[in-house]
Image (tube, helix red, strand yellow):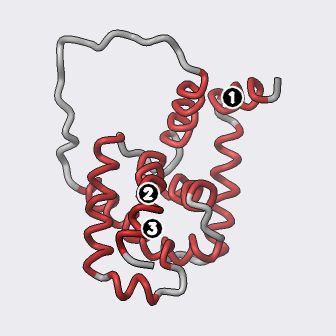
Amino acid sequence: MEFTEYVAARRAALVRSAVLLGCPQPDAEDIVQSTLTKAYRSWRRVQRADQPDAYVYRILVNTLRDARARKWRREVPTHDLPELAEPDRDLAAGLAVRHALAALRPDHREVLVLRFFADLSEQQTADTLKIPAGTVKSRTARALATLSEQADIAALTTERGR
């Protein structure tokens, strides 16, 4: 697959993964742009990798970690607040999931996003995060247990079950 085809097929999922990993949407766009720039520079290695998606997600996770290590968070205070819109069920569900993920430890959040959103296997997730597969399993179990205790997720699963 050529680089432009890869970007067209995977960019949206990469941005969504970055958002689920705790980035605001504009920052996620920047992180993915940096990720894709790094992937382009080593595109031959990406193509030769056994799991090109796992390779690119590894770049994404590293780029995000590097960005978080910097102090400035680009927040600009303002006196004028935007008007509130009507609540949207899908938006509310998405916010509940983001809020629940944000409450997790970063290592647990990474495992859940890579396993269940990026749809990487346990071994691909382990390779991406450079941890043993058993650690992926235990982090996944602990993270899911933590999520099940959160009121936002409990309300969401109850509402969906109606």
- Which residue is drawn at the image coordinates 37% and 45% (left, top)? 23
Q: Earlier in the sequence, mark 1 or mark 2?
A: 2
Amino acid at circle 1:
Leu
Q: Position of residue 56 (x, y in %)?
A: 42, 71
Q: CA distance from mark 3 to mark 2?
A: 8 Å
Q: Residues within 10 Å of mark 1 (few under 14, many from 20)?
A: some
**Left or right: 46 in relation to 68:** right
Q: Earlier in the sequence, mark 1 or mark 3?
A: 3
- Which residue is drawn at the image coordinates 48% and 47% (left, top)? 20
In the image, residue 106 above or below residue 59 = above
Q: Position of residue 127 (x, y in %)?
A: 53, 78
Q: Earlier in the sequence, mark 3 or mark 2?
A: 2
Whether the residues at callouts 3 and 2 have beta carbons within 8 Å, the answer is yes
Whether the residues at callouts 1 and 3 have beta carbons within 8 Å, the answer is no
Q: Nearer the viewer, mark 1 or mark 2?
A: 2
* Residue behind mark 1: 156
Q: CA distance from mark 1 to mark 3?
A: 28 Å
In the image, residue 144 above or below residue 77 = below
Q: Position of residue 28 (x, y in %)?
A: 34, 49
Image quarter of the N terminus: bottom left
* Residue behind mark 3: 57
Q: Secondary structure at mark 3?
A: helix
* Residue behind mark 2: 14
- Which residue is drawn at the image coordinates 70% and 47% (left, top)? 145
Amino acid at circle 2:
Leu
Image quarter of the C terminus: top right
State the image quarter where residue 31 is shown: bottom left
**Left or right: 158 in relation to 4:** right
Amino acid at circle 3:
Tyr
In the image, residue 2 above or below residue 24 = below
Which of 39 and 71 lies nearest the eye of the viewer? 39
